[in-house]
Image (spheres, helix red, strand yellow):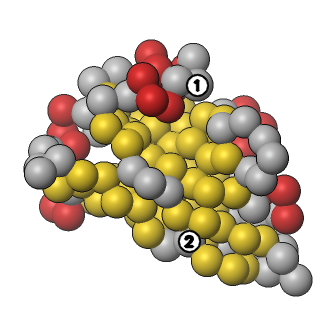
């Protein structure tokens, strides 16, 4: 069964950090890019990043605070969130696809596979 499962969300204070994970089962991430998206309350879903085995691109507004990494041994991808702000509060999703095309056009459901998200709440 093909699945993507996000984890690592939670409540964090402003300025804090979290590491989100996206674990794949039923397929290998070696041949897929992983896109991270988020949806804040009352807002549209937005793209965050697109990463392959060899490259990672982060949306300009989030560069310097968010980074991605891969753990091929665990068939997982991580999203490191640093210096979090209240406006980063959102449900964070990962999705897999052979290319970044759907991520670039912010087409979450245009990806081959996606997870159900993990909630990040930034509040004091």
Task: Residue at 41% x, 61% y: name it.
Answer: 6
Residue most extreme to the front: 42
Any part of residue 121 in sight = yes
Q: Is residue 3 above or below residue 12?
A: above
Tell me whether circle 2 and circle 1 mark residues in contact (CB < 8 Å): no
Q: Which quarter shows the C terminus?
A: bottom right
Q: Is residue 46 left or right of residue 68?
A: right
Q: Compute the Cα span from label 2 to label 1.
A: 22 Å
Which residue is at 31% across, 38% downward? 113
Where is 10 relative to 1, above or below? below
Q: Secondary structure at mark 2?
A: loop
Residue 77 is drawn in which quadrant?
bottom left
Residue closer to the observer: 103 or 54 = 103
Q: How many discs mark residues in the rendered view?
A: 2
Residue 56: tell me if it is visible. no
Q: Is residue 92 left or right of residue 76?
A: right
Q: Residue 54: x, y in percent?
A: 33, 35
Query: Mark 2 sits on what residue?
Result: 9
Residue at the (17%, 55%) spot, across then down: 25
Dot 1 falls on a residue whose secondary structure is loop
Q: Quadrant of residue 109?
A: top left
User: Relative to 118, is 63 on the left or the right?
Assistant: right
Instruction: Say which residue label 1 marks.
Output: 106
Residue 100: image location, x then y, percent: 42, 23
**Which badge, 2 or 1, comes first in the chain's sequence?**
2
Residue nearest the viewer, comparing 24 with 30 = 24
x, y (%) of residue 102? 46, 20
């Amino acid at each position: 069964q093909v699945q993507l499962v996000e984890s690592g969300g939670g409540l964090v204070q402003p300025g804090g950090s979290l590491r989100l994970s996206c674990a794949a089962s039923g397929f290998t991430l070696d041949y897929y890019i992983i896109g991270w998206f988020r949806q804040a309350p009352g807002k549209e879903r937005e793209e965050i990043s697109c990463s392959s085995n060899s490259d990672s691109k982060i949306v300009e507004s989030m560069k310097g605070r968010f980074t991605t990494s891969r753990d091929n041994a665990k068939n997982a991808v991580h999203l490191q969130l640093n210096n979090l702000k209240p406006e980063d509060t959102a449900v964070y999703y990962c999705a897999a696809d052979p290319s970044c095309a759907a991520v670039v056009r912010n087409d979450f459901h245009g990806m081959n596979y996606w997870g159900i998200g993990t909630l990040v709440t930034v509040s004091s």
